[in-house]
Image: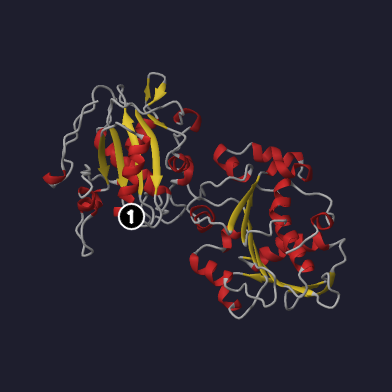
Amino acid sequence: MKIEKGRLKALWEKWTPTQEKFVFDFEHPEQLMIGGWGSGKTTAGVRKAIILSITCPGSLGMICRQHYTELVDSTMQTFFNECERLGIIINFNHARRLVQLRSIDPNKPSVILFRCLDDPTKYQSTELHYIYIDEANEALTDEMKYQFLSKRLRQPKMPSYFFFLTSTPPSKNSFLYQLFVERKNEQRITYKASSYENQENLPESYLKSLEDMPPDLKRKYLYGEWGADITGKPVFTEFNKQIHVNEKIKVNSDLDVIRSWDFGFHRPVCLWMQIDSDNTLNVLYEYMGTDIYLTDFAEKIISISNKKFPFCHFVDTCDPAGAQTTDKGKTSLEILRDFNIIPLYRRMPIMQRVYIIKKLLTTLKGNRPALQIHPDCQILIEAMMGGYHFPETDSPKIKEEPFKDGYYDHVVDALGYAVSIYYPIELPKLTGQIRKPVALSSEKRYLTGIKKF
């Protein structure tokens, strides 16, 4: 698409750097702009829609949001504000929820539909030039919606097609993160914007209120970074990023490296950690797979182990469920045995594992806590900061256990499997030598000795 950027940019006086990059990117068919509150995300989205409509005569575009109320009160309001001085609106049909715009061809106006996405199947016969979804974290929540909507981009005689989104930063267990980060390809791109980019259009008191938020919330809502959605009370309220995250901890080749495995096809996890001479647990590295079979995941873990921890001896712990026999073939432990990996496991309730981790967080060994995490372990850090939380409910029937979100719970489980073995359940003082765990596996063939540290 040939566009005179200078003339189009002059349609509006003010641009933030990220707005300009996002709006004038006509190379990537799928684009996502995430940003802090007040960073100008929606403004960027509607400007891109306007430019596509006026430069492609006869274009049929669709501006969407999950619910119609928010679409009218927020996104459409921004749209008409951005159109106000351009004189491009020919007609607005409120009943049909569409607007007709002038294009560069006086004989071929373009049309924009305003639609909610509570039921995307309503648009199955619509042929579109582009789709813009505002607050896409609310609307684009699964593969089905993505596939259904993206396949509407088939309006005849259009030079190219665009599926672009704006959103407050969702969590890393969201579909948007999976689509634009884990499944990133040459057609998809993400732009990030902080609230500071748009500070000249924001009240000083508003920015100050964002700056006063807790660090985990500032990361998302001020700096525009992917983060955790905290919808309930964080499990590890004792966690302090300034205290428990330490970039100085390093692998000691004289000590065993513990690998702790959490199984599962969708989000398997492995943590690498060591226990040093004063019984401090140092979590050194993490890896989370996505939709991967255990055989392939094991090969990946072995490759990472050899690369990140050369000349080290490894001991392994795992989810006790890995020993369960099913009708699908080998158990997880039997598959690992094929790789000469024989993990220890111990059956222990979730809240007991949580208690041990909390005890480690609040126990000082000299001038440092008994649990330290390297900055490379971002998923675990976000889980500690609130991604791993109790469900928000008033129902007394809900068991008081952490919410299983299918993302952060896996990495905390992996940590829990290790501490359940290498630290006493009671944790009276966390001093002295680490005791050899007892009553681990009921199957002797999975038991190995544990080297004292």
Judge from the rendering whether residue 252 lies leftward or rightward of residue 78; answer left or right.
left
Judge from the rendering whether residue 299 lies leftward or rightward of residue 204; answer left or right.
left
Q: Quadrant of residue 309?
A: top left
Q: Residue at x 18, y 31 (%)?
A: 436
Near-viewer residue (215 or 174): 174
Q: Amino acid at mark 1?
A: Gly
Q: Quadrant of residue 430?
A: top left
Residue most extreme to the bottom: 125
Can you say which quadrant of the picture contains the N terminus?
bottom right
Q: Residue at x 42, y 48 (%)?
A: 408
Q: Position of residue 300 (x, y in %)?
A: 35, 47
Q: Position of residue 68 (x, y in %)?
A: 66, 68
Q: Quadrant of residue 55?
A: bottom right
Q: Secondary structure at mark 1?
A: loop
Can you say which quadrant of the picture contains the C terminus?
top left
Return the residue at label 1. Answer: 264
Colouring of the image: secondary structure
Judge from the rendering whether residue 163 lies leftward or rightward of residue 336; answer left or right.
right
Residue 293 seen in this snapshot:
yes
Near-viewer residue (309 or 88): 309
